[in-house]
Image (spheres, coloured by chain):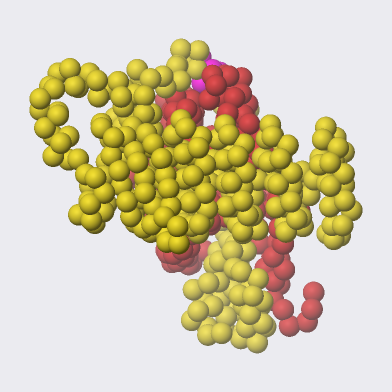
Chain colours: A red, B yellow
């Protein structure tokens, strides 16, 4: 690294099953040398866009196997997004189910004005936004979730931790931090939460975030800035 | 570059969302401004906090259960058929009317039987024959009332266009190419008309305004779906200036190159890609064509283009 630059390594995104509009899969990045778009990624995106278009046309002709292939391409990402936003396996399953059924029923109206990827994400984010709005009204506690049998559990128990294994003190701190982060995320408006989710956790480009949320890239940028400022304010004392 | 601007955009920098030149300037500024460098470190700490609790992947069991539940539902679910759309989705119902002239005609006939006199008087009152007053109220035209475009002609030496179209009775509209109503009719004709000559005329005129997003979308639609190769060629021609900058146009041209049934359309599509041969998706398609395309000319041209490609790392 050249002298005079500031090395601040940290991870951004890196969790998503990356396809269109998503950043490279690098888990750790040095801020001063952001990764250029990887040639293979771009080619892969174009090819998968074309593959999707072929599958959508088949599905529009009534080929259910083609639709199921589309589901397989995206359902893990959809479930991950729903799970992270709802905090409940049961509700995530409902969102998953409703999103793909809606897509199946209305795929005949898909006019290729955007990619299938953007379209399905638009359906899912709308369902999740409805969920977030309802939850804001109910003011549920964020970290507590319910499993498929209706029993409550702490979401943080589900997070794998390879570092704290034999260190109860560190594990306790990690859980406290999780509670703080959950509370900070709850303070965001549903739209800010969604932009932050899609950008930070799902790794989408802001242009794609704008398309998914039916808004402009500029608005998505402003919303991300606002969300980050709020979160930094809420978590300022954590180091 | 001012510190204030930089701090507002530091988040974008951290997410690699700044343009190359802004990123370069940001890095230059960070190297000489300790305060902004501190702000960047603070942002790094913020991200590090989040990294300690990564998003959880759905468990294989949850994914499998979700898939199974979906499959069960798909067994009984039906894709939106006509009756379902008419019954349950008013938005789609209206779209059906807008984009399916035959359906419009059927609905008209049913309505006609129910109230001949009233309908007739209403239509007479609404009738226009290309008068200036009609032209100056573009919002008065209801797309759903257009049953089909009869003919399109451009007056020599001007950008005035005459369009004859069927509403509930034949009508005629005149106006400049810039007239919103004329544009609506052209867009409608390009997508919906059964007469390929009319589609050809409308696409030809639309190619004069490819900068308009709706026009470009319609040209892409024509290139992808029009059954007439002449119309597809015309649409391809209209899109030629946007292959480089608009990824949707590029995808449509690539699709035409790979799948179009007409060799002329494919060859024209291949020529258009000369300007963007450095694009990775174009490279892949060209390499594929160079190896295995059935058309000898396309194969050899693709080989030549692949051979001339600059090296990319």
Count of numbered labels shown in the rendering: 0
| Region of the chain picked out in magenta, as a range | B68-72
The picture quadrant where one finds residue B115 is top left
Task: Give the image location of residue A57, x and y in percent.
Answer: 58, 28
Please name whichever residue, A126 or B236, is drawn nearer the observer in this view of the structure. Answer: B236
Please name whichever residue, B110 or A219, is drawn nearer the observer in this view of the structure. Answer: B110
Q: Is residue A146 visible?
A: no
Q: Quarter of the image containing the C terminus of chain B?
A: bottom right
Q: Is residue A202 magenta?
A: no
Q: Is residue A235 above or below residue A111?
A: below
Task: Give the image location of residue B86, x and y in percent.
Answer: 31, 22
Q: Is residue A189 above or below residue B254?
A: below
The picture quadrant where one finds residue B278 is bottom right
Please name whichever residue, B292 or A35, is drawn nearer the observer in this view of the structure. Answer: B292
Q: Residue at x 64, y 50 (%)?
A: B250
- Residue extending furthest bottom? B32
Q: Residue at x 28, y 39 (%)?
A: B171
B161 vs B282, left or right, is left
Q: Is residue B20 above or below residue A17?
A: below
Q: Is residue A108 visible?
A: yes
- Predominant SS along the magenta part: helix
């Amino acid at each position: 690294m050249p002298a005079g630059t500031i090395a601040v390594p940290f991870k951004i995104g890196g969790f998503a099953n990356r396809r269109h509009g998503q950043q490279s899969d690098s888990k750790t990045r040095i801020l001063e040398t952001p990764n250029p778009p990887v040639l293979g990624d771009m080619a892969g995106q174009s090819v998968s866009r074309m593959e999707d278009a072929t599958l959508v046309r088949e599905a529009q002709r009534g080929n259910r196997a083609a639709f199921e292939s589309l589901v397989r391409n995206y359902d893990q990402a959809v479930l991950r997004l729903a799970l992270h936003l709802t905090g409940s396996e049961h509700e995530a399953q409902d969102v998953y189910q409703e999103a793909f059924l809606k897509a199946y029923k209305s795929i005949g109206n898909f006019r290729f004005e955007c990619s299938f990827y953007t379209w399905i994400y638009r359906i899912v984010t709308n369902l999740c936004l409805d969920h977030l709005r309802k939850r804001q009204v109910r003011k549920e506690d964020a970290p507590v979730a319910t499993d498929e049998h209706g029993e409550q559990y702490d979401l943080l128990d589900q997070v794998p931790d390879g570092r704290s294994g034999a260190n109860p003190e560190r594990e306790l701190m990690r859980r406290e931090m999780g509670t703080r982060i959950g509370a900070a995320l709850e303070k965001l408006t549903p739209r800010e939460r969604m932009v932050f989710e899609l950008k930070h956790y799902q790794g989408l480009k802001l242009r794609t975030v704008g398309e998914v949320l039916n808004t402009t890239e500029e608005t998505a940028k402003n919303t991300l800035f606002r969300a980050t400022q709020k979160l930094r304010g809420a978590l300022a004392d954590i180091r | 570059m001012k510190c204030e601007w930089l701090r507002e955009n530091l988040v974008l920098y951290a997410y690699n969302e700044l343009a190359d030149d802004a990123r370069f300037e940001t890095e230059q500024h960070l190297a000489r401004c300790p305060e902004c460098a501190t702000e960047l470190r603070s942002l790094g700490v913020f991200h590090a906090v989040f990294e300690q609790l990564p998003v959880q992947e759905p468990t294989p069991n949850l994914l499998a259960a979700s898939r199974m539940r979906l499959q069960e539902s798909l067994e009984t679910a039906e894709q939106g058929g006509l009756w379902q759309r008419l019954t349950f989705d008013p938005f789609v119902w209206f779209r059906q009317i807008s984009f399916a002239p035959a359906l419009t005609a059927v609905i008209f006939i049913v309505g006609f039987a129910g109230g001949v006199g009233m309908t007739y008087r209403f239509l007479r009152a609404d009738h226009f024959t290309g008068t200036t007053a009609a032209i100056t109220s573009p919002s008065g035209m209801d797309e759903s009332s257009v049953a089909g475009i009869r003919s399109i002609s451009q007056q020599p030496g001007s950008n005035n266009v005459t369009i004859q179209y069927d509403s509930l009775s034949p009508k005629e509209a005149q106006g400049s190419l810039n007239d919103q109503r004329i544009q609506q009719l052209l867009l409608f004709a390009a997508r919906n008309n059964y007469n390929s000559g009319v589609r050809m005329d409308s696409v030809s005129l639309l190619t004069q305004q490819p900068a308009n997003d709706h026009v470009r979308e319609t040209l892409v639609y024509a290139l992808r779906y029009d059954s007439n190769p002449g119309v597809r060629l015309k649409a391809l021609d209209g899109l030629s200036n946007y292959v480089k900058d608009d990824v949707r146009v590029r995808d449509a041209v690539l699709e035409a190159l790979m799948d179009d049934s007409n060799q002329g359309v494919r060859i024209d599509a291949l020529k258009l890609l000369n300007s963007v041969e450095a694009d990775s998706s174009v490279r892949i398609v060209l390499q594929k064509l160079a190896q295995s395309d059935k058309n000898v000319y396309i194969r050899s041209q693709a080989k030549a283009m692949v051979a001339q490609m600059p090296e990319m790392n």
